[in-house]
């Protein structure tokens, strides 16, 4: 693993093998970085053109999981307890508790703080984690614990 200068890493963060955390990346407490996942820090790099003064900061909020081989394109925020699936490519902000997969990454569901998928009986409204029984409220593209 490689940790660049001026990186901020919170308490309880787990960084697995073959991960490079570059300047401009902030990992809040309890973030999980899966094996071989990738951060970028310059949006349009060129070998012959120095662009380190064009860094785009990336923020990964508390408790988020970044799956194996996913790519986080610079300049985005990954919300609290969001879950980025293996191999996903994230090109825009991810809300709290979102489950994102694919290329480009899309929200396909919602996750509990305990790391299990949430179920909602109706489109919006109350939902429950079948594992820990925590209640959540969904309102459009936002989910929060009750």
Image (spheres, helix red, strand yellow):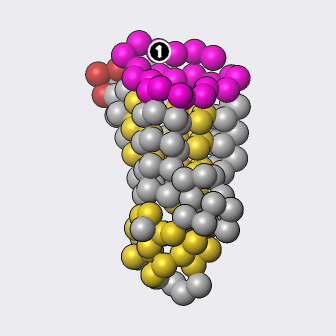
Residue drawn at (59%, 84%), measured in percent from left and top? 121
Q: Quadrant of residue 76?
A: top left
Where is residue 71, by image quadrant?
A: top right
Of residues 48 and 29, the one drawn nearer to the viewer in this rendering? 29
The residue depicted at 44 percent of the width and 49 percent of the height is: 80
Is 128 positioned to the left or the right of 17 in the image?
A: left
Query: Is residue 15 highlighted in magenta?
Result: yes
Q: Which residue is mark 1?
A: 4
The verdict on residue 142 being magenta is no
For label 1, count other residues whose C-alpha is less than 10 Å away and answer few (under 14), some (14-19) or many (20+). Answer: few
User: Does residue 36 sit above or below 6 in this rendering?
Assistant: below
- The range drawn in magenta is 1-23
Residue at horizontal 58 percent and vertical 60 percent from the top: 111
Residue 85 point in image, percent of width and height = 65, 51
Where residue 89 sits in the image (x, y, percent)? 58, 48
Quarter of the image where the N terminus is located: top right
Residue located farthest toward the left when viewing the structure as drawn: 53
117 vs 41: above or below: below
Q: Is residue 118 above or below residue 55?
A: below
**Observer able to see residue 102:** no
Q: Which residue ends up furthest to the bottom in the rendered image?
A: 122
In screen coordinates, is 31 left or right of 7?
A: right
Give me the residue at 42% from left, 68% from top. Answer: 146
Which element carries disc 1, helix, strand or loop? loop
Q: Quadrant of residue 9?
A: top left
Res 11 seen here: yes
Question: Residue lying farthest front?
Answer: 133
Above or below 16: residue 48? above
**Numbered label tally:** 1
**What secondary structure predominates along the stretch shown in magenta?**
loop
x and y percent of residue 51 in the render?
A: 35, 23
Outermost residue, top side? 5
């Amino acid at each position: 693993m490689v940790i660049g200068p001026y990186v901020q890493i919170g308490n309880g963060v787990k960084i697995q093998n073959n991960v490079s955390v570059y300047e401009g990346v902030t990992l809040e407490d309890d973030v999980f970085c899966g094996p071989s996942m990738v951060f970028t820090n310059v949006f349009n790099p060129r070998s012959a053109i120095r662009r380190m003064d064009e860094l785009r900061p990336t923020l990964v909020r508390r408790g988020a999981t970044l799956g194996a081989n996913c790519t986080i394109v610079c300049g985005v925020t990954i919300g609290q307890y969001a879950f980025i699936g293996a191999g996903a490519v994230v090109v825009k902000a991810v809300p709290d508790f979102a489950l994102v997969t694919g290329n480009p990454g899309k929200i396909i569901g919602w996750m509990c703080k305990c790391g299990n998928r949430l179920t909602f009986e109706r489109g919006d409204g109350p939902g429950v984690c079948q594992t820990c029984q925590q209640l959540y409220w969904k309102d459009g593209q936002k989910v929060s614990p009750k």
